[in-house]
Amino acid sequence: MTGRTRNIATLSIIIVGALALGGCSLFSGTPKDTYELTGIEPVKGPYSKRRQIVVTDPSAVKSLDGANIVVRTSPSSIQYLGQSQWNDNLPAIVQQKLIEAFEDSGRLGGVGKPGDGLAVDYLVAPTIRSFEIITSGADTAVIEISVRIINDRNGVVKAQRTFQSTAPVSGVDNEDFVVALDRANGEIMNDIVTWALKII
């Protein structure tokens, strides 16, 4: 995975054990550290130079439909990583990273988002099911994204698959949690694009 510029401010919060993540309300006046996901190495796959695709706006539950970084402390309880945020709403980031990964593959005739004016052959429609750090047991980044490939000309779902990736957290700082999420995201982006290129 190639590194891209990461806007990481100096971290002042240390996360210990099961995490003390109540800091958001206690430090509401302090600017949050802002993070972005990096890209991936270009994916290789079949050429479909006559095909053009649109990556639709990903759907997500409310807790994932924003810039907060989610930490799941139990199966029924979530918190947000203290004094930290993504550089945009998470669905917009996932959409943009998928578009970049398809573009960088060089395998398609065109890639865009809704409203870009492409003569679309297929829609790639992602749903973000999970994008979080799980702290029950060893701290682990877990991402799960379901993807449908839809024929834009007749609305038929050509293929559908759910992808999951994980990465261990190797530290207790905020940046360590983000690095693990970034690693898991790189893996799942690669898997999605590799699979989609075979279908399209």
Image (cartoon, rainbow, N blue to C red):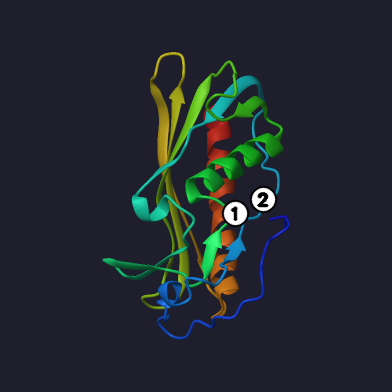
Tag 1 secondary structure: helix
Give the number of marks.
2
Horizontal side of 54 relative to 139 (left or right) equals right
Task: Check contact, mark 1 vs mark 2: CB within 8 A.
Answer: yes
Please name the residue that numbered disc 1 is placed on. 186
Instruction: Name which quarter of the figure residue 139 lies in.
Output: bottom left
Please name the residue that numbered disc 2 is placed on. 40
Q: Identify the residue shown where x is 70% and y is 44%.
A: 42
- Viewer-proximal residue, 65 or 51? 65
Query: Looking at the picture, which amino acid does disc 1 mark?
Result: Gly
Q: Identify the residue shown where x is 70% and y is 38%.
A: 104
Q: Which mark sits nearer the N-terminus, 1 or 2?
A: 2
Quadrant where the N terminus sits is bottom right
Q: Identify the residue shown where x is 72% and y is 55%.
A: 4
Query: Looking at the picture, which amino acid does disc 2 mark?
Result: Ile
- Viewer-proximal residue, 13 or 179? 13
Q: Identify the residue shown where x is 53% and y is 67%.
A: 84
Instruction: Name which quarter of the figure residue 105 lies in.
Output: top right
Q: Dot 2: few (<14), some (14–19), or many (≥20) neighbours within 10 Å? A: many
The residues tagged by marks 1 and 2 sit, at their Cα atoms, a distance apart of 6 Å
| Relative to 74, residue 155 above or below | above
Horizontal side of 172 relative to 38 (left or right) equals left
The circle drawn on residue 110 is none
Tag 2 secondary structure: loop
Q: Where is residue 140 in the image (x, y as percent from the top left)?
A: 46, 70
| Relative to 90, residue 177 above or below | below
| Relative to 115, residue 41 above or below | below
Q: Dot 1: few (<14), some (14–19), or many (≥20) neighbours within 10 Å? A: many
